[in-house]
Each structure stands twice: as structure tokens, then as C-alpha cells.
Amino acid sequence: MQDEATLLDEAALVQRAKALDSEAWAAIYLHHYRKIHAYLCHRVGNPDVAEDMASSVFLRAVEQIHTFDYRGIPLTTWLYRIAHNLAVDYVRRVSRVKWEPLEDSIADNGASPERAAEISLDVSELREAMKDLTEDQRQVITLKFFLDLSDAEVAKVIDKREGAVRALQHRALVSLRRLVNRNE
């Protein structure tokens, strides 16, 4: 949860952004770009496409900032919503998402070669199992566990109630456990 000073700073930043203050937009871009890019990488499975889409998120944000009414909800949530809409459009166009490794640097974390191989297999298994989840379930898992958003933030991004987010998370985790255990 954001503290009051942070909320006031963000409210001021949003007002400056609405006035098309380039320094405000630079701060917004620098603070949020990596998270938006990571989210889009998980959604579309292609870092190059995700990079283009992340740029489009910020372009749309500049174009639509006048419609954003700051009410204490983090600006990040609004940016994720824009990214979500772009990702949904992209997935519809290509009709099949290719999943890339969750972390290319996973094997470069100082672990022994044996442990790195185990981790790589676990990630590969998880990636395959996630393909069998529904789109909403994949979305919740990505936002909650890869991007560390709260239930409330996930609910805003995917435009569902918090209870629905918790239900989707539960069903997704049950399915993942079943799918991964089936392959053992």
C-alpha cells in the first residue's frame, strides 16, 4: 500500500503529466517501463514485440492522460490496463502466444550446473503447464507472481472483482499443480 507522501507525489506527477510536462513523462517512463515491458514479455512471449508494445503503452498514455482521473489508485494500474488491452489485441491478431523462458538469466545465478539444469527444467515445465490455463488464469498468475501485484491491482488491470481474482488464482494453482504432478 502506498503511503500518503507517495500518493501526494504521484498526484502531483499526474497533474504535471496532464500539462504535458516532459520531465514528468520522463519520470513516469523511467519508473514504469521495466515493469510494463516484463508484463508484456510474459503476455506475448517475444521480447522484441513486447518492447514495441511497451512503447505503444506510453504513447497511448500520453494521448489519453486527459481521461485519467487520479483517485489514489497507482498510475501503474492504469498503465497495466493499457498494456493488457494492447496484449489482448495482439494475441487476437496472432491467435497463438509463444512462451519464451521466464528468465534468461536463471542459469546464471551462481548455482551449480546441476541445479541450473533442474531450475531450467522446472521453468520449462511451468511454461508448458501455463499453456493449458485459461487466458484469465495466465493473466492472474503473471500479474500476481511474476510482477508481484496485489489482488486489488490485478482486479483493476483485468477489470474483475478481487474475489474473482482470488478464485482465478486458486483454480490456476490447482491446475498447475495437477499438470506438473501429472508429468512427474
Image (cartoon, rainbow, N blue to C red):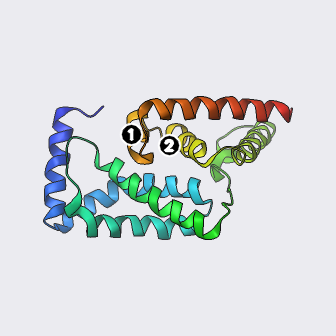
Callout 2 secondary element: helix
Point out residue 133 in the picture as x, y percentages from the top left corner: 67, 43
Disc 1 crowd, CA 10 A, few/some/many (<14, 14-19, 20+): many
Q: Quadrant of residue 151?
A: top left
Q: Quadrant of residue 182?
A: top right
**Residue plotted at (45% across, 59% down):** 85
Residue in the foreground of this view, choosing between 69 and 80: 69
Would you place residue 1 above or below residue 54 in this image? above
Residue in the foreground of this view, choosing between 138 and 76: 138
Q: Is residue 47 visible?
A: no
Q: How many marks?
A: 2
Which residue is denoted by mark 2 in the rendering? 143
Disc 2 crowd, CA 10 A, few/some/many (<14, 14-19, 20+): many
Marks 1 and 2: in contact by CB < 8 Å? yes
Q: Amino acid at mark 1?
A: Glu
- Any mark on residue 133, and which? none
Residue in the foreground of this view, choosing between 43 and 118: 43
**Residue plotted at (50% across, 52% down):** 39
Point out residue 116 in the picture as x, y percentages from the top left corner: 75, 41
Point out residue 70 in the picture as x, y percentages from the top left corner: 20, 48
- Any mark on residue 153, and which? 1
Task: Indicate the quadrant containing the N terminus: top left, top right, bottom left or bottom right.
Answer: top left
Looking at the image, residue 85 sits to the left or right of residue 122; the answer is left
Looking at the image, residue 47 sits to the left or right of residue 56; the answer is right
Point out residue 146 in the picture as x, y percentages from the top left corner: 54, 42
